[in-house]
Amino acid sequence: MRRSDSRRAHHQRGSVVVEFAFVFPILFMLIYGTIVYSYVFVINESIHYAAKTAAESAIRVDPAAEDYETLVASTVRSTASRILDWMPASQRARFADSAGEAIGTVSFEDVDGMRAVRVELDFDVSESTPAIFPIITLPLVGEVPPLPARMRASAIALI
């Protein structure tokens, strides 16, 4: 190795640090965004699955039961709550009451002359404290990552 080559390598060490300082924020945002959006996707899919399965669970209730609609609503809410048990308590609280039941709207309606139950779950993403993920505010860019304010799922099953 010639002397001029070693001197050139020594002078380029500083440029590597400067280049890394420019590239690191971009790499960090890509990785952070991938993690955040992956988790938001999992939550969204879980809410939709919980609504669908909870609506389907309404058929387990005997239609001849004395307090049929109350039993259906209780069964639907407990099914949705059981499916969403994997979530941390702070996130379940975004759509769960103090007893841990999933707060969802359970309504009865007629679909083509047949009775049906509709289950709607609503998950508050951005307004609750603590936040699901910290939001980073960048100059000229704004909030990163931008998240939806709410995620909703709805399912209907004939009973």
Image: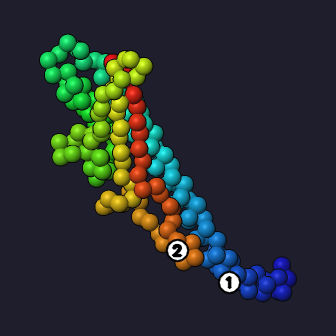
Residue drawn where x is 49% and y is 46% of the image: 41
Q: Secondary structure at mark 1?
A: helix
Residue 128: % across, % down: 32, 59
Q: Which residue is mark 2?
A: 138
Side of 33 relative to 158 (left or right): right
Q: Earlier in the sequence, mark 1 or mark 2?
A: 1
Q: Is residue 69 visible?
A: yes
Give the residue at x 51% y 65%: 144
The residue positioned farthest toward the front in the image shown: 113
Q: Residue at x 52, y 74 (%)?
A: 138
Q: Residues within 10 Å of mark 2 (few under 14, many from 20)?
A: few
Q: Position of residue 23 (x, y in %)?
A: 64, 71
- The furthest residue to the left: 66
Up-down relation of residue 78 to residue 113 (above or below): below
Given the image, on which type of amino acid does mark 2 rest?
Leu
Mark 2 element type: strand
- Residue at label 1? 14
- From what the image shows, is residue 156 above or below residue 8? above
Q: Residue at x 30, y 61 (%)?
A: 129
Amino acid at dot 1: Gly
